Amino acid sequence: MLESIVTAAKNAAFELREKADLKPGQIVIVGCSTSEIAGRRIGTESSSEIGAAVFTALNNLFAEHGIFLAAQCCEHLNRAIVIERRAAAGLETVNAVPVPQAGGAFAAAAYSSFLSPVVVEDIQADAGLDIGGTLIGMHLKKVAVPLRLETKHIGKAAVIAARTRPKYIGGPRTGYDDSIL
């Protein structure tokens, strides 16, 4: 089962990178419920083995392309973010260390695997993967655009992806009829 989970995670990361046209230095937020991957209800059966496997698969692909992975903690740590210190410039760090039962197995794997991990309260990421209904939207830039991936599940967990784009503000109004005012 772990092999198919890793393969699905790699596929999802590859698809997100391609479809979101991610560039070096950009940040991908990932929320991951290992309980959901295992077919359980979110927050009920954290798995360090699954967390480490999924983290490694995603981080290897993103790091290879100079993209930073940001790992969202669970609600017990107020959905704080684990990220490499060099990607957290200008962000205020908080004093927390995620563990599987408080922060989540995925975030704990990130904290123990990053070269110089820090935990921050929030971030504005360029794209994201929500694995198992973890609600990553609060950590995406203002205009999030859903992406349809071919990879719909990692294990038993549903996968939802998003990219962001700059706001459209101002400019000519096309197709707008001022006479109705």
Image: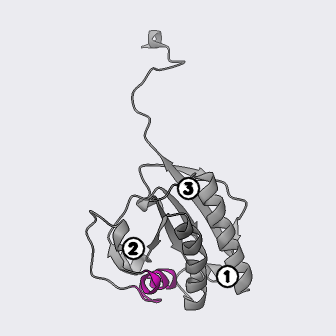
Q: How far apart are the alpha carbons under marks 1 and 2?
A: 30 Å
Q: Quadrant of the N terminus?
A: bottom right
The three-letter amino acid code for the residue at tag 3 is Ala
Q: Position of residue 62 (x, y in %)?
A: 55, 67
**CB-based contact (under 8 Å), mark 1 and mark 3:** no
**Bounds of the magenta span?**
98-114
Seen at 31% across and 83% down, the residue is 96
User: In the rendering, which numbered label is found on residue 84?
Assistant: 2
Which element type, helix, strand or loop, lies under badge 3? strand
| Residue at the disc numbered 3 | 162
- Residue that carries the numbered disc 1 in the rendered image: 39
Q: Where in the figure is residue 175, as x and y percent of width and height?
A: 54, 18
**Image depth: mark 1 or mark 2 in front:** 2
Residue 102 magenta-highlighted: yes
Separation (CA) of disc 2 from disc 3 = 21 Å
Counting the numbered discs, the total is 3
In this rendering, the label closer to the viewer, 2 or 3: 2
Question: Nearer the N terminus, badge 1 or badge 3?
Answer: 1
Counting residues from the N terminus, which is met first, the one under dot 2 or under dot 3?
2
Q: How is the image coloured?
A: one colour
Instruction: Where is residue 108? Give x, y as percent.
Output: 45, 85
